Structures are given as C-alpha cells and as structure tokens.
C-alpha cells in the first residue's frame, strides 16, 4: 500500500510532498563550494517568495547553539567532510515544519548519496534541482575573497571541499540529471547575469507568482 504521506497525481506523475500536514514545494540548490548558491538564493527569496534553508548554515547554527553534536560537526566542517545525514535532515525537517511558508530552497543538500537517501526516507522529493556550474579556479578565488570569517574558507579546507564535491556531490547531480530534473546554470558570469538565467527558470516554474511579484513591485502612482 502506498504511504499516506505521498500522493501521486496520476495525470502528471508528480509526487506531492506533504510535511507536517502541509503540501510543500522543494527546490534543491546545488553547485561547488563558492559557486554562488547562497548569493542567488537571496535573490530568489526576494523575487519569488521562497524560504532559503542552507544546510551548511543550519549546521553552523547548531555548533553555536552548544548542542551535544556541536564539536563533532565543527570538526567535520573544518575538514571539509560531510556531516552524518540524520543530523542534517533533522535540522532541515524541523526548519521546514516550523516555517509558515510552503516553498523551500534547500541549499547545499543533498551533498552525497546518503543525504539523498535520507531525504527520500522522509518521503519528500525535489520539484527540480538548480545546479550552478563553475570552474574550481573561479570558485577558489571567490572563497578566498569571501571574508565572512568561515572556518572552512582556507586553502587547505577548500582543496578538501573540492575533492568531496567531485567524488560525492557530483554523482548526486548526475543522478537527478538522469531523471531530467536538473536546470544547469552557468555560474561563472557576474552575479546579475547569473540571476537573469535563474529568473528564467523560476518564471517557468511559478509564472503566476512571478506576475504577482511584478505587480507588487510596480511604483506607486501617488
Ligand atoms: N557570480 C559571481 N561572481 C563573482 N562573485 C560571486 C558570484 N556569486 C557569488 N559571488 C561571491 O563569491 C563568494 C561565495 O558566494 P556564495 O557564498 O554565494 O557561494 P556558495 O555556493 O554558497 O558557497 P558555499 O558552498 O561555500 O557556501 C561570496 O563572496 C559572493 O559574494
Ligand atoms: N548537506 C551538507 C551541507 C553542508 N555540510 C557541511 O557544511 C560545510 C559548509 O557547507 P556550505 O554549503 O555552507 O558550504 C560543508 O563543507 C560540510 O562540511 C554537510 O556536512 N552536509
Ligand atoms: Mg553557501
């Protein structure tokens, strides 16, 4: 028997995500370290009304909260490795349930097959995957210039993060690509130009919302 929390619309063969009693839309935002995921998510939030959940940011907040897992998470992040999925999925799930919104950008997750399976195990699936494609050379330059005091923005950890991205994260993108779910964006361009391409994707995905948003941004006649 089909799990009650997953309803498949027969006509479109689209899986409906039900979480905490509400129907939610999920877009995974993936790309290498420094490809611009966080930067573009802020723009998407502003223009399309999504809630941005960065897995890395949730983990950093968990460290600061003094949680019992804090020291372990801190060590893993400093080594550029991936935190066990049960920790990250719990943080994401709690944030989605607590939010009043019903559409989420999940940034930096899934980072490996274990992450992907953990998301499937809570009976959720992404509507699509936004993938920011950028060279290591450019990403490295951006990370070293980010200046936000992140413990992993140093040359040694950056090299490890690139290794993990190649070995563990790209196969996840390839998995979704094999299901035709990936919208690939050239992220090597300037921020505003990247966002033009991102906007095209989201205007196709939620055209009604895009129109509504344009209306609310019209200058007042008064
Ligand atoms: N298209 C761009 N061109 C130049 N600089 C950019 C571009 N996009 C983002 N940046 C800058 O690069 C740095 C990294 O961007 P951002 O934090 O958005 O990347 P990220 O993909 O979220 O990285 P991480 O995976 O490490 O969290 C920031 O300083 C940001 O201002
Ligand atoms: N699914 C994830 C996401 C992130 N991490 C750890 O956090 C670090 C920073 O992530 P950003 O997305 O902010 O770059 C990352 O290098 C991992 O150590 C994780 O374990 N699992
Ligand atoms: Mg980020």
Image (cartoon, rainbow, N blue to C red):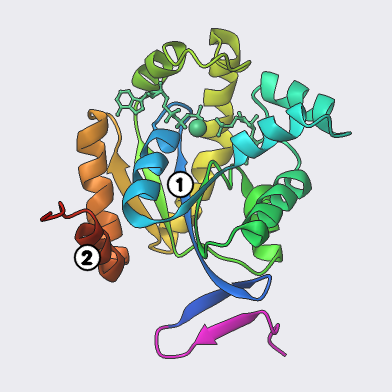
Predominant secondary structure in magenta? loop
Q: Was residue 158 drawn as part of the magenta stretch in this picture? A: no
Q: Which residue is mark 1?
A: 29
Gap between marks 1 and 2 measured at Cα: 23 Å
Closer to viewer: mark 1 or mark 2: 2
Q: Which residues are magenta?
A: 1-12
Q: Which quadrant does the N terminus fall into?
A: bottom right
Q: Which residue is mark 2?
A: 211
- Checking the image for residue 101, the label placed there is none
CA neighbours of label 2 inside 10 A, class few (<14), some (14 to 19), many (20+): few
The residue shown at (83%, 29%) is 66
The residue shown at (74%, 52%) is 90
Q: Earlier in the sequence, mark 1 or mark 2?
A: 1
The residue shown at (83%, 24%) is 71
Give the vertical position of 187 relative to 161 (above or below).
below
Give the vertical position of 174 relative to 69 (above or below).
below
Q: Nearer the viewer, residue 135 or 46?
A: 46
Q: What is the tally of numbered marks visible in this picture?
A: 2
Q: Position of residue 73 (x, y in %)?
A: 76, 29
């Amino acid at each position: 028997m089909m799990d009650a929390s997953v309803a498949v619309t027969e006509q479109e063969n689209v899986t409906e995500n039900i979480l905490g009693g509400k129907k939610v839309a999920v877009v995974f935002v993936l790309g290498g370290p420094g490809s611009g995921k966080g930067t573009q998510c802020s723009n998407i939030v502003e223009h399309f009304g999504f809630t941005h959940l960065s897995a890395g940011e949730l983990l950093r907040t968990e460290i600061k909260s003094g949680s019992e897992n804090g020291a372990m998470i801190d060590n893993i992040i400093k080594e550029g490795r991936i935190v066990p999925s049960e920790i990250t999925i719990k943080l994401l799930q709690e944030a989605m349930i607590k939010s009043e919104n019903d559409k989420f950008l999940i940034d930096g997750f899934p980072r490996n097959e274990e992450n992907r399976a953990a998301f499937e195990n809570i009976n959720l699936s992404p509507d699509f995957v936004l993938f920011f494609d950028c060279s290591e050379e450019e990403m490295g330059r951006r990370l070293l210039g980010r200046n936000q005091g992140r413990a992993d923005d140093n040359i040694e950890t950056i090299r490890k993060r690139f290794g993990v991205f190649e070995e563990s994260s790209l196969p996840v993108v390839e998995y979704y690509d094999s299901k035709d779910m990936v919208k690939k964006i050239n992220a090597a361009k300037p921020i505003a130009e990247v966002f033009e391409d991102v906007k095209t994707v989201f205007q196709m995905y939620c055209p009604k919302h895009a129109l509504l948003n344009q209306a609310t941004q019209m200058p007042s006649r008064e």
